[in-house]
Image (cartoon, rainbow, N blue to C red):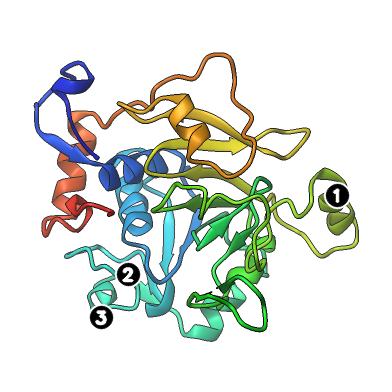
Amino acid sequence: MHITFEEIGGRGTGKPFEIQELMTVVMARSLRDNELAGTGAGSAMARAACRLAQLLHAPGLSYLAGGSGAVNPFLEPLAASSCDYANLLCESTLNLAELISSIPAGRVDVFFYGGLQVDRFGNVNLSKVGDSAHPRLRGPGAVALPLIASAGRGLIFMTDHSPRSFVEKVSFMTAPGFLDGPESWEKAKAEGYIQGGGPALVVTPLAVLDFEDTSRRMRLVSVHPGVTAEQVRAATGFELIIPAEVPTTLPPDPTEMRLLREIDEDGLLRQPLN
């Protein structure tokens, strides 16, 4: 999906932006000053979102770059993986034990993650698809994702939005969302298995979604420029909550685009997703 500023009403420079850039800007806007964010291994969008937020509205934000253990990497340059040595141009580093232990200790305010599948309650599968004994597809696995339940909130970003990735029920629960709904979620919290706030936002190539407060079901928040609510409905393998009026996702403004292009001078986020 390739969109220009002219196509959405001429908000400024006329330069095109790609869908990964739009997704990154949306995620950056959701971050708050003085938070601690955690990102996983394949997290170029997440790390760029954190750095963009630091430069724009959250100078006190800190973020951890997954496998490298880097604290506040400067992203000079932005690397595809958080395990890349380029991330070690940073303020500090943590070893793996320190990195993992920061999540269950409740220090992480927001954690970025994605997966092979996500369901209506925000449970994410990054492990395997199909029969557990003989899966038809294997993913990279869990690492720290089971500890997501201790993070303040989760920010799920998916590079595919289709019925194969947005499913009625995940084949394997790598990262818990709202489990089977509000009753099971509240029970798990009362028994101490869940300490965090659960998933708060889902960002995809088509839309921005969140979770309705009472039912904990996924809800459509906005559609990206050029996308309709009906297209999102058709691309989702379960029944979404869709409000009567669904706005268009606010596109990047010229300042957001300029800073993001400086962060990503090699153009990683300008590559098409498919």
Q: Secondary structure at mark 1?
A: helix
Query: Which numbered disc, 1 or 2, marks the residue that appears first in the sequence?
Result: 2
Which residue is label 2 attached to?
91
Question: Disc number at residue 186?
Answer: 1
Residue visible at 26% across and 67% down in the picture:
80
Horizontal side, residue 209 vs residue 87: left or right: right
Q: Nearer the viewer, residue 50 or 107?
A: 50
Task: Identify whether 83 is placed above or below 158.
Answer: below
Q: Are marks 3 and 2 in contact (CB under 8 Å)?
A: no
Give the spatial CA distance, label 1 vs label 2. 38 Å
For label 2, the crowd category at 10 Å Cα-Cα, with few meaning under 14, some 14 to 19 and many 20 or more, is few
Q: Secondary structure at mark 3?
A: helix
Residue visible at 25% across and 80% down in the picture:
85
Task: Identify whether 225 is placed above or below 63.
Answer: above
**Residue 155 drawn at (x, y percent):** 52, 50
Query: Which numbered disc, 3 or 2, marks the residue that appears first in the sequence?
Result: 3
Mark whose residue sits in front, 1 or 3 = 1
Picture quadrant where residue 92 is located = bottom left
Q: Nearer the viewer, residue 215 or 34?
A: 215
For label 3, the crowd category at 10 Å Cα-Cα, with few meaning under 14, some 14 to 19 and many 20 or more, is few
Query: Which numbered disc, 1 or 3, marks the residue that appears first in the sequence?
Result: 3
Residue visible at 65% across and 60% down in the picture:
170
Which residue is label 3 attached to?
85
Give the spatial CA distance, label 3 vs label 2. 14 Å
**Residue 87 drawn at (x, y percent):** 28, 72
Give the spatial CA distance, label 1 vs label 3. 41 Å
Of the residues shown, which amino acid type is indicated by label 2?
Answer: Glu
Of the residues shown, which amino acid type is indicated by label 3?
Answer: Tyr
Task: Identify whether 255 is placed above or below 80.
Answer: above
Mark whose residue sits in front, 3 or 2 = 3
Task: Identify whether 199 is placed above or below 93.
Answer: above
